[in-house]
Image (cartoon, grey):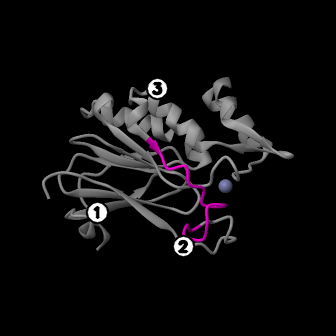
Amino acid sequence: MLVEAVGLQDGAWVQQVHGGRVLRAEEAGYLGEADAVWTTQSGLGVVGRSADCPLILIAGPSCWGFAHASWRSTVAGITATLIGDMVAAGLEPEQATAIICPSAGPCCYEVGPEVKTAAIADLGPGIADCFVQLGERPAFDLWRANAGVLEAAGLPAQRIFVSGHCTICGGEEYPSHRRQHGQAGRFAAISGGGDS
Ligand SMILES: [Zn+2]
């Protein structure tokens, strides 16, 4: 299994539904519908899947998790909720490391104007800085939006790694829902740790 290939004992996963729900994994296996999962169980990896949405991996010495930060989940505050739950369980944000995986970048991720309206309504006027104009339509910079959440939560900027690779224009090695017109595969990312 995938998790064993990276030296973990077992994995936990969810059905990702573009919402704001965060779950704590106490054991391996399928947990239900959510867009972020975290755990403190040694040897347990949490597994996220994506084609164009950013997966945000967060890991501290004894707590690790991921968020599937689609635009809807980002507007729902998924990354802020995830890190808030992890901090409540003892994660020290200044000791944590985060990775924003390859996903649709601000170069390509066109959205309708209603997305910008929804983001400003739910996240405040500051989120407008995370939209760039691509011709007629705005693009939502989900990398910048989620990196901003991580910094606001206390992660040092030098411990936030943004891949910067765009799955739409970055080449064939990335599965892309948009470039492949819904026929894309998915890539998985695992956040794990412990004495395995
Ligand atoms: Zn691009």
Amino acid type assigned to the residue bearing label 3 in the image = Ala
* Quarter the C terminus occupies: bottom left
Amino acid type assigned to the residue bearing label 2 in the image = Gly
Disc 1: CA contacts within 10 A as few (<14), some (14-19) or many (>=20)? many
Rendering coords of residue 137 (x, y %): 82, 46
Rendering coords of residue 106 (x, y %): 67, 46
Towards the viewer: 182 or 100: 100
Q: Is residue 53 left or right of residue 22?
A: right
| Above or below, 113 relative to 109 | above
Q: Is residue 13 magenta?
A: no
Q: Secondary structure at mark 1?
A: strand
Q: Is residue 106 visible?
A: yes
Q: Secondary structure at mark 2?
A: loop
| Whether the residue under disc 1 has CB within 8 Å of ligand 1 | no
Disc 1 marks which residue? 11
Q: Earlier in the sequence, mark 1 or mark 3?
A: 1
Q: Which residues are magenta?
A: 161-175
Q: Residue at x 59, y 43 (%)?
A: 142
Disc 3 marks which residue? 152
Q: Are marks 1 and 3 in contact (CB under 8 Å)?
A: no
* Quarter the N terminus occupies: bottom left
Amino acid type assigned to the residue bearing label 1 in the image = Gly
Q: Is residue 172 magenta?
A: yes
Number of numbered discs overlaid on the protein picture? 3
Q: Earlier in the sequence, mark 2 or mark 1?
A: 1
| Whether the residue under disc 3 has CB within 8 Å of ligand 1 | no
Q: CA distance from mark 1 to mark 3?
A: 29 Å
Q: Which mark is residue 118?
A: none
Q: CA distance from mark 2 to mark 1?
A: 20 Å
| Above or below, 72 relative to 172 | above
Q: Is residue 76 visible?
A: no
